[in-house]
Image (cartoon, grey):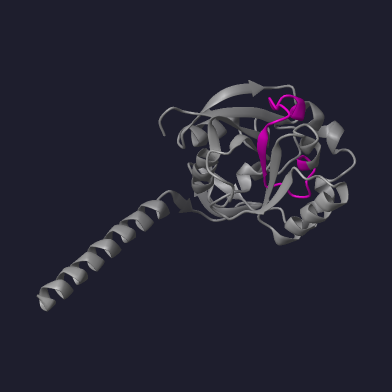
C-alpha cells in the first residue's frame, strides 16, 4: 500500500507539472519578439510592438502647464459617465493629473490611483495627503494585475498607458474581473491615424488595433468620440461571455 501511495503521488506531480508547463507555453505563445524599433521593447502583441514605458523622469511632462489645453482633459473627464458614487480606477496614474480631478467628481465614491513605478506611488501618496482627499486610494499595481477587488469598478481608464503595458492580455483580463457587470473601460490614446501628430509611432494607436486587442479579451466598443484634439476617446463594455 505504501508503494502504491508513493507511485500515485509521483504520477500526480508529473501530471501537475505537465499541465503547468502547457499553460506556461500557451501564455508565452501570446507574445512574439522582434528587433526593437525606436522607443519599442521588441515584444509584439497581436501585430503591435509594445512601447517602452516612459519613466518617472517624465513626471514634469505629465504635469506640463499646457496639457489641459493640448488634450482638452476636462472635456474627457466630463464624458466619463461619472456620478458622485462612482468607483473608478486610474490605471497608470503617474503623478495623478487625472486622479485628483476625478476625485472631486466622485465625492461619495472612490478612485484607485493604480501605479507600477515606486517613485510615482510615493508622489501620489504625498499629493493625496496634501489635498486631503479621502476618496483616493493609492495602489501599487503589478505587471499583470491592477490589485483592486473583483467586480468593484464602474469605470477603469488608461490615458496614454495601454500601449506601454508589458502584458496587455493579462492586464485586460485583470481589468475585466475588476469591473462590475455593467462597468466600462476607457482608453485615451494618441491617434496613429494622424501623420502630423508629433508623437513617437509606438506611442500612438489606431482605433482598429485597439478594438482588435480588446475584443480578443472580452470587450466590445461601446462609445467612440472624436472631440479630443489629439487622442482617441474609446469606451468599451464587457461582453456577456468572455
Against 104, residue 119 (above or below) is below
Q: 29 and 161: which one is in front?
A: 161
Q: Magenta segment, which residues?
A: 76-99
Q: 216 and 9: which one is in front?
A: 9
Spot occupied by residue 75 in the image (x, y as percentages of width and height)? 79, 26
Image quadrant in which the N terminus is located? bottom left
Spot occupied by residue 58 in the image (x, y as percentages of width and height)? 79, 53
Q: Is residue 77 magenta?
A: yes
Side of 215 relative to 91 (left or right): left
Q: Residue at x 67, y 29 (%)?
A: 232
Furthest residue in direction bottom, as rendered: 2
Q: Is residue 209 visible?
A: no
Side of 168 relative to 159 (left or right): left
Q: Residue at x 71, y 48 (%)?
A: 137
Figure disc tally = 0
Image quadrant in which the C terminus is located? top left
Spot occupied by residue 233 in the image (x, y as percentages of width and height)? 67, 28
Against 233, residue 47 (above or below) is below
Predominant secondary structure, magenta span: loop
Amino acid at each position: 500500500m505504501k508503494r502504491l501511495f508513493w507511485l500515485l503521488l509521483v504520477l500526480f506531480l508529473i501530471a501537475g507539472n505537465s499541465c503547468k508547463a502547457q499553460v506556461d507555453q500557451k501564455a508565452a505563445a501570446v507574445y512574439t519578439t522582434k528587433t526593437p524599433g525606436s522607443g519599442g521593447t521588441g515584444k509584439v502583441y497581436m501585430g503591435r510592438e509594445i512601447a517602452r514605458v516612459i519613466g518617472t523622469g517624465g513626471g514634469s511632462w505629465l504635469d506640463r502647464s499646457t496639457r489641459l489645453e493640448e488634450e482638452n482633459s476636462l472635456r474627457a473627464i466630463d464624458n466619463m459617465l461619472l456620478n458622485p458614487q462612482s468607483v473608478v480606477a486610474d490605471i497608470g496614474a503617474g503623478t495623478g493629473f487625472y486622479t485628483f480631478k476625478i476625485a472631486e467628481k466622485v465625492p461619495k465614491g472612490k478612485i484607485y490611483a493604480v501605479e507600477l513605478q515606486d517613485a510615482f506611488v510615493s508622489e501620489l501618496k504625498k499629493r493625496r495627503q496634501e489635498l486631503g482627499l479621502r476618496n483616493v486610494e493609492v495602489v501599487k499595481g503589478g505587471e499583470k494585475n491592477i490589485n483592486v477587488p473583483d467586480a468593484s469598478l464602474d469605470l477603469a481608464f488608461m490615458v496614454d498607458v495601454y500601449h506601454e503595458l508589458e502584458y496587455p492580455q493579462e492586464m485586460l483580463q485583470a481589468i475585466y474581473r475588476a469591473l462590475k457587470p455593467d462597468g466600462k473601460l476607457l482608453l485615451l490614446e494618441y491617434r496613429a491615424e494622424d501623420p502630423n501628430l508629433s508623437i513617437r509611432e509606438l506611442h500612438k494607436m489606431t482605433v482598429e488595433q485597439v478594438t482588435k486587442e480588446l475584443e480578443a479579451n472580452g470587450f466590445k466598443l461601446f462609445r467612440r468620440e472624436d472631440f479630443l484634439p489629439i487622442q482617441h476617446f474609446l469606451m468599451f463594455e464587457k461582453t456577456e461571455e468572455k
